[in-house]
Image (cartoon, helix red, strand yellow):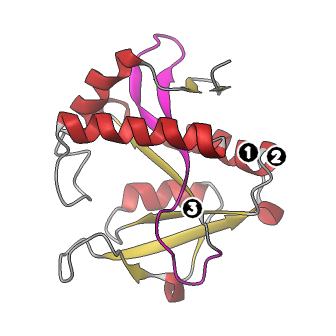
Amino acid sequence: MDFVLDTERLRLRAWQSRDHEPFAAINADRRVREFFPALMTREESDASIRRFEHSQVQHGFCFWAAELRETSELIGFVGLERMSFQLPNVSDPAVEIGWRLTPKVWSQGLATEGARAALGHAFTELGIAEVVAITVPSNLASRTVMEKLGMTHDERDDFDHPRIPHGHPLEPHVLYRIRRTSWSSV
């Protein structure tokens, strides 16, 4: 059976072939990619879906397809992924929570709603001890979601992203974290 995690307004689920085109459009949107070094090509977007699917098989979680329950429209992803590089002061392998949604649903609380469900799944079903989130310092919308989830930021954990070219304005990143012992589903 395919993975499904429902919230009041969202369904987080396994990726389907019908998701490739709308996800590629999301990844080609300059507003969505504002805090990334480049837009994604269709091939790069499809490859990311294949990585997500592999993660689901290998680890039992991934950045799941996020759709509106009312319409079944794909609006992006919300979920969990193992970090592919070591973070300072974080046990390896770190588990990251992330979201990427189409701008037409921004500012509706959907990222927070989906991420809260993903955190609950991480802590109660998967038994993960700690979840982290990363972004650039200027991404205030994502940082607000992290704070609404109860995640905390310590400047001593900030780092330069190893996959961003040295000296690039998006190289500095902030790290937020939350432990299972301090999580509340409220």
Residue located beneath label 1 in the image? 120
Along the line of sight, which residue is nearer the eye, 139 or 25?
25
Residue located beneath label 3 in the image? 147
Q: Is residue 107 visible?
A: no
Rendered location of residue 15, percent (x, y) = 47, 26
Along the line of sight, which residue is nearer the eye, 73 or 43?
43
Magenta segment range? 62-91
Answer with the quarter of the image where residue 30 lies: top left
The crowd level at tag 2 (other Cα within 10 Å; few <14, some 14-19, many 20+) is few
Q: CA distance from mark 3 to mark 1?
A: 16 Å
Q: Secondary structure at mark 1?
A: helix
Q: CA distance from mark 3 to mark 2?
A: 20 Å
Rendered location of residue 158, percent (x, y) = 45, 82
Mark 3 / mark 1, whichever is N-terminal: 1
Task: Check disc 1 and give the amino acid type.
Answer: Gly
Of circles 3 and 2, the one toward us is: 2
Task: Check disc 3 and give the amino acid type.
Answer: Glu
Q: CA distance from mark 2 to mark 1?
A: 6 Å
Is 114 placed left or right of 101 in the picture?
right
* Residue 37, magenta (yes or no): no
Q: Is residue 1 visible?
A: yes
Q: Are marks 2 and 1 in contact (CB under 8 Å)?
A: yes
* Residue 77, magenta (yes or no): yes
Answer with the quarter of the image where residue 150 lies: bottom right
